[in-house]
């Protein structure tokens, strides 16, 4: 896709755009913190679906499957609207679909649990599709506004704003859910639906900063058409293809254990939603503290270095689940501590993606990377959910799969050990990735 040159932005315009991007990230994070994935998971578990492993997998995987539609984003940007208007429209529609999802789960509709779950999955899926389409436009838009030499620091600061908003929102949702469950135990579902609907309003409000942010520094409108060749161009780039391979490996083995990772804290350890959201909030606070440092580190030492240091820490999270029991549930807290390292991935992964993408084809590269990794994690979630239901039905949670005089391994421990080994092995794939910068070397450091 060829880009049309646009006016160069002044230093003041660039700085104002970054401040507005921080506000957008913070408000969007507040909305997603109030309507978080754990809240949706617990709402689904309240529906009483028989095959809960598959149900959880569908909720987590369906958005990634439908997210393959974001490959069309580069073609739609320019044909329907420029990046700014396309981004705003996509995010607004996402907020509307999310609100419809929470409304569909209200008992007043008197739907069967399986039908309600189907509505939740479809609308949850549609919400993410619209969000993903908007993200393709937003990432390419932000990349035009922020020069490569300081982009890591910008992403680190924006991540700090985001995790601050999400942490505060999760704390509020956790306290509300706890108080509601204590006083209205017959309507626990409302303790999930009310924060979720409030979150949808905040998501809509997060678009206001984007409305006042200047259009992209180079193109404000993409070319009117997209060929199959231009959409597939990223897959023909050897350097970017290696990076896609790393993202797919890490995403696949991340997704494969998601059912067990979601079910184990609630069903086995007995961790209720308020505590779960409290742990999420603590994790976000840790990410808040480290995100700017990760951004500076990425700019100085390279994104690949940050990823190489973060991935093993994330992989070690499942080891804490291996030793946690209902009587010693506190060991599971270590998993949320290890997940703080996702701050490094959240900064370095998109930064390296934008760095490896030529400016003239950035939307296509962003869409290709996010689609490939999204499909991998979706496929893994579905396979993992079906496999979990089969293994759980055959062996049960407490049956020992391997036992000797020194140690015993049950079903959950086997899954978590498998996750640790396979996710750590993604470092071998990362070794093949080479960091390069196709951006304009004369870009200002403003």
Image: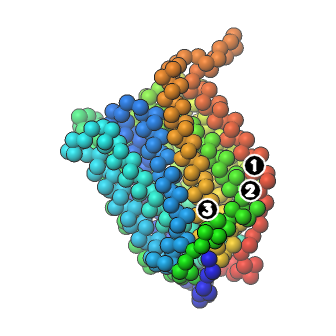
Image location (x, y in percent) of residue 57: 48, 40
Question: Residue, x 64% and y 17% (percent of image)?
Answer: 402
Question: Residue, x 51% and y 20% (percent of image)?
Answer: 394
> Who comes first in sequence, dot 3 or dot 1?
3
Question: Residue, x 51% and y 52% (percent of image)?
Answer: 64
Q: Circle 3 sits in a helix, a strand or a loop, which is it?
A: helix
* Mark 1–mark 2 CB contact (< 8 Å): yes
Image location (x, y in percent) of residue 158: 55, 64
* Image position of 230 (left or right of 391): right
Q: How is the image coloured?
A: rainbow
User: Would you place residue 70 above or below residue 314 in this image?
Assistant: below
Q: Quadrant of residue 411?
A: top right
Q: Circle 1 sits in a helix, a strand or a loop, which is it?
A: helix
Residue 176 visible (yes or no)? no
Q: Give the residue pinned by disc 1.
A: 429
Q: Give the residue pinned by disc 3.
A: 368
Q: Quadrant of residue 223?
A: bottom right
Image location (x, y in percent) of residue 199: 36, 56
Give the camera-side residue of 195 and 224.
Answer: 224
* Image position of 134 (left or right of 200): right
Q: CA distance from mark 3 to mark 2?
A: 13 Å
> Who comes first in sequence, dot 3 or dot 2?
2
Graded by Cα atoms within 10 Å as few (under 14), some (14 to 19) or many (20 or more), the crowding at tag 1 reads some
Q: Give the residue pinned by disc 2.
A: 242
Give the camera-side residue of 250 and 319.
Answer: 250
Q: Circle 2 sits in a helix, a strand or a loop, which is it?
A: helix
Image location (x, y in percent) of residue 210: 46, 74
User: Would you place residue 199 above or below residue 150 in this image?
Assistant: above
Q: CA distance from mark 1 to mark 2?
A: 8 Å
Q: CA distance from mark 3 to mark 1?
A: 18 Å
């Amino acid at each position: 896709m060829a880009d049309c040159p646009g006016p160069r932005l002044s230093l003041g315009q660039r700085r104002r755009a970054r401040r507005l991007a921080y506000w957008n990230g913070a408000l969007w994070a507040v909305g997603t913190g109030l309507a978080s994935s754990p809240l949706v998971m617990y709402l689904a578990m309240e529906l009483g679906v028989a095959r809960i492993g598959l149900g959880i997998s569908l909720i987590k995987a369906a958005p990634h499957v439908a997210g393959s539609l974001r490959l069309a984003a580069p073609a739609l940007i320019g044909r329907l609207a420029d990046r700014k208007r396309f981004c705003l429209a996509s995010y607004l529609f996402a907020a509307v679909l999310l609100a419809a999802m929470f409304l569909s789960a209200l008992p007043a509709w008197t739907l069967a649990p399986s039908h309600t779950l189907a509505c939740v999955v479809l609308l949850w899926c549609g919400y993410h599709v619209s969000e993903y389409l908007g993200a393709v436009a937003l990432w390419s838009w932000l990349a035009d506004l922020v020069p490569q030499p300081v982009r890591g620091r910008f992403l680190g600061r924006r991540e700090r704003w985001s995790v601050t908003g999400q942490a505060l929102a999760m704390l509020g949702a956790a306290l509300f859910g706890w108080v509601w469950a204590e006083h209205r135990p017959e309507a626990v579902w409302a303790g999930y639906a009310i924060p979720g609907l409030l979150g949808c309003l905040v998501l809509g409000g997060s678009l206001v900063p984007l409305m006042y942010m200047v259009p992209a520094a180079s193109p404000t409108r993409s070319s009117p058409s997209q060929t199959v060749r231009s959409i597939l161009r990223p897959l023909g780039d050897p350097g970017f293809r290696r990076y896609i391979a790393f993202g797919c490996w890490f995403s696949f083995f991340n997704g494969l254990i998601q059912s067990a990772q979601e079910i184990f804290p609630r069903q086995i350890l007995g961790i209720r939603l308020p505590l779960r959201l409290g742990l999420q909030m603590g994790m976000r606070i840790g990410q808040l503290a480290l995100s700017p440092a990760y951004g500076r580190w990425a700019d100085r030492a390279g994104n690949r270095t940050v990823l190489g240091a973060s991935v093993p820490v994330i992989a070690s999270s499942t080891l804490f689940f291996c030793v946690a029991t209902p009587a010693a549930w506190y060991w599971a807290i270590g998993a949320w501590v290890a997940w703080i390292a996702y701050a490094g991935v959240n900064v370095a992964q998109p930064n390296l993606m934008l760095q490896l993408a030529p400016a003239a084809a950035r939307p296509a590269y962003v869409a290709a990377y996010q689609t490939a990794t999204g499909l991998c994690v979706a496929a893994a979630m579905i396979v993992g959910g079906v496999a979990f239901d089969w293994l759980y039905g055959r062996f049960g949670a407490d049956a020992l799969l391997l036992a000797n005089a020194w140690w015993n391994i049950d079903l959950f421990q086997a899954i978590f050990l498998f996750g640790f080994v396979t996710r750590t092995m993604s470092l071998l794939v990362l070794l093949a990735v080479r960091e390069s910068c196709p951006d304009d070397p004369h870009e200002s450091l403003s």
